[in-house]
Amino acid sequence: MFRTKPEERLVSDDPSDANESDPQVIEPWTDEIAGIVTRREQAQALGGREAVAKRHAQGRLTVRDRIDGMVDRGSFHEQGPIAGHGETDPDGKLTRFAPANYVLGLAKVDGRPCVVGGEDFTQRGGSPSPAGLRKSVYAESLAVRLRLPLVRFLEGGGGSVTGPAGKGRLAGDPVFSAPRFRSMGQIMGIAPVASAALGAVAGFPAARLVASHFSVMTRRDAQVMIGGPALVERALGESLTKDELGGAKVHARSGVVDNIAADEADAFAQMRRFLSYMPTNTSELPPVRPCDDDPERREPSLRTLVPRDRRKVYDTRALLRAVLDRESVFELTAQFGRSQVTALARLAGRPVGVLANDCRFYAGAMTADGAQKVRRFVDLCDTFHLPIVSFVDEPGFMIGPDSERNATIRHGTAALFAVQQSRVPWISVVVRKSYGVAAAAHYGPDGIVLAWPSAESGALPLEGGIAVAYRREIAEASDPVAKRAELEEEWASRRSPFPRAESFAVHDLIDPADTRRELCRWLEWHAPLLAELLGPAYYTYRP
């Protein structure tokens, strides 16, 4: 290697030797810095002043408005703020700049860090530009790398036949690039993902919506579709509006989204509330909040909640409100699989998952939709270390031709497997019925089981079981109806929960008024076990 001798050094160490007339004085990077400023200003303007004004005139928010409405004030730190497409003149001066139509960054929600991003509808209707597509994929990769919750605002039409660059040439990603779905799948097993559909969402953005632990859509402005009306009409010859295809009325009952929001502000509030029950990632425990609701509080009204007449219904949600911390119940997917109730809540300030039956729908029987709802919810709780509280009033799987066509037994068995593979602590309170295979979806491995005086259980509900077991005797009776009633009354006296308690088939038979106290004590004893579950999920959460 060539070395310069000390006496031949080209630059003196003595500052006094500097020559003020030295022609090599470095000029400031004024033009380049101006280029940065210009690009930042244009990126802040999204699709331009007119496009933003039109958006606001329609009563709609831009993606930057949405970020401001969701995150803590002043906490947003944008990533890739000048990504986009620029054009310059022969002298290198910027003549045109189109910012990426996806905005993302790091921020805080209620003081906790997260990654947040969303499509810019003021450019290309949210259909991704080349830089916009890269940024949207990077948002998920960033959340994976930093192990942070991901918040998405979705409003876009997905891909275009002309491609992200707006040209007809079709070219795929390089073979060495990571598939864009990889980070989407990875983040589901690492940190909470909350997504909101805030306008028309189709194609890839629709997949992103369901690839979330919590999804919400606005009632009036949002639609979620695999393909829009034009594609449907071209392929199927059916002329439908966006709302008819994928509006809130459709997806509240389809299970595509968890919740419906009155407006965008409500959607932001629901996402914040969902995240408040979640840990930052699977290596942390769910956050505990101060609680002024007495863990020892008794609720005498529960003694009269369940009617003695088994054919009469009661309000399951009144039970949840009475037992769980006041104002802490946050229900998920209320309009889908309505015989099953799933909610996040707190007991003595600790987050829990809540599973229950709603006897007002199919007597609480598990349908195919209800089974899918239970499976997803149990996976959610197990992924993020939320103990599960189950209130059981399960008459069994729904029967009949519709149930067979809907593959109820397959979906039901998947729910049973999710329950049996879960690792979080469980406690089950048998409120009334606990029958058949479906009842097993309400009892976790090695869980605690309490029962109310109204509890009953068996292989089949009383009426169906007698009709099967005594079919010949009933048919040969002079009065089959009277004979069936006689047998049902005889067996009804055997439904008492005391034999189960006496044989230690349940851990305890309790006064319904003491339910909250028993649940809070259970959680206090079992919460320390959650620390053993910290770390990556041993399976990946699947939507």
Image (cartoon, rainbow, N blue to C red):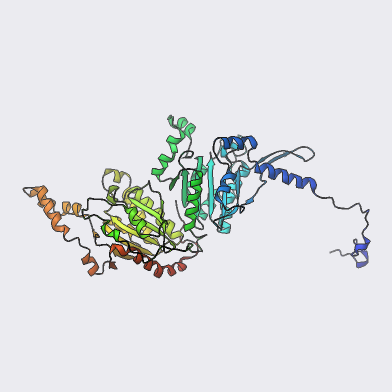
On screen, residue 449 versus residue 61, left or right, reads left
- Residue at the far left in the pictured view: 478
Q: What residue sits 92% from the left and 54% below the top?
A: 22
| Viewer-nearest residue: 461 or 58 | 58
Q: Residue at x 26, y 69 (%)?
A: 504
- Up/down of 464 relative to 493, above or below: above
**Quadrant where the image shows the N terminus:** bottom right
Q: Position of residue 186 (x, y in %)?
A: 52, 55
Image quadrant assignment for residue 456: bottom left
Percent position (x, y) of residue 336? Answer: 37, 46
Residue 208, percent across and down? 50, 47
Report whether residue 373 is seen.
yes
29 up-or-down from 157: above or below: below
Q: How many marks?
A: 0
Q: Is residue 129 depicted above or below 151 in this figure?
A: above
Q: Nearer the viewer, residue 408 or 97?
A: 97
Residue at 27% across, 60% down = 303
Left/right of residue 441 with respect to residue 470 in the rendered view: right
The quadrant in which residue 237 appears is: top left
Instruction: Inspect this view and state whether residue 174 appears.
Output: no
Instruction: Please indicate whether residue 7 sits to the left or right of residue 438 in the image.
Output: right
Q: Camera-side residue: 420 or 323?
A: 323
Residue 365 in percent (x, y) is at 29, 51
